[in-house]
Image (cartoon, rainbow, N blue to C red):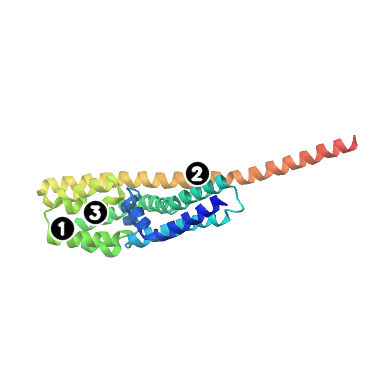
Amino acid sequence: MEASILRAIALLVWMALDKQILVLVEKIAENDLDGLFKIMRIKDQKAWLSKRYSVVKSARYLWILSPFIPSVLLDVLVLLLTIILYKQKYYWLKQKAIQKRLLMRYQFPIYLRQLQVLLQNNTVLTSFQLSISQAPMSMKEDIQTMVDHLCLHPNQLEEYMTFLEYYHLPEIQRAMKWMYRYQYSGALHSYHHFNRMIVATSKWLRQERSFQKSKHLLVSQWWGLVPLLAVSLVFMSAMMQIMMNLFERR
């Protein structure tokens, strides 16, 4: 009885401290959460964290079952459920971000190819501006932002290097360095850098296509095992039935 009263008090205290706990949740959030928000285009971060905590709060209502469940078991259930609910939304977000990161690894070299065509008759800045309409949807906002910044600070390398930096893809950073060198090198050096970009992009495209092909083949191989597994189960069921019939006859 005393344990039930203590849990009821703890439940009321927890409910009263919701605002303070939400502030604490914002401070102890995972280190890579900002990058995940950028990848997933989540603008209102506080709303996401608030919704995350709202899901976590449902675990505390298990204490209402205190008269029916042993004390230690109930406390363990509340603790485990709180941890699971707190991490579940983060892992879901991270998994979605990983998928977008893989998609970006595939889309960016294709976009870079389009950009190389535009570079033959335009400056780097103009090429970026013209490429926006044909760029993948996931990149258009970032390209527009970079173009706006380059119009204000055309000589800043940082404006190139911050492009899609939150994806943490070294290939993108390397390509943007080449863009900067191409913009501010002499004619001979520009031609050299342009050829390097073409070679590197071709290699990157081959790698990504090979990766995508191997991934599809892996999925196909697993699906190919399904009929084999089904036949094996049918065969084992038939053998079990035959053995049972033999034992019954004896």
Nearest the viewer among 159 and 120 is 159
User: Disc 1 marks which residue?
Assistant: 123
Q: How crowded is the residue under tag 2: few (<14 C-alpha within 10 Å), some, or many (20+)?
A: few
Amino acid found under the numbered disc labelled 3 = Phe
Q: Which residue is located at x 42 percent, y 47 percent?
A: 212
Say what secondary structure mark 3 lies in.
loop
- Residue 62 placed where, x, y %? 54, 55
Q: Nearer the viewer, mark 2 or mark 1?
A: 2
- Residue 86 placed where, x, y %? 44, 52
How far apart, in angstroms, are the residues tagged by discs 2 and 1?
Answer: 43 Å
Q: Which mark is residue 163?
A: 3
Left or right for 18, reference 238: left
How far apart, in angstroms, are the residues tagged by discs 2 and 3?
Answer: 33 Å
Q: How crowded is the residue under tag 3: few (<14 C-alpha within 10 Å), some, or many (20+)?
A: some
**In the image as oriented, which residue stretches furthest toward the top?**
250
**In the image as oriented, which residue stretches furthest toward the left?**
186
Q: Nearer the viewer, mark 2 or mark 3?
A: 3
Q: Which residue is located at x 21 percent, y 63 percent?
A: 129
Nearest the viewer among 61 and 177 is 61
Amino acid found under the numbered disc labelled 1 = Thr
Say what secondary structure mark 1 lies in.
loop
- Residue 70 placed where, x, y %? 59, 47
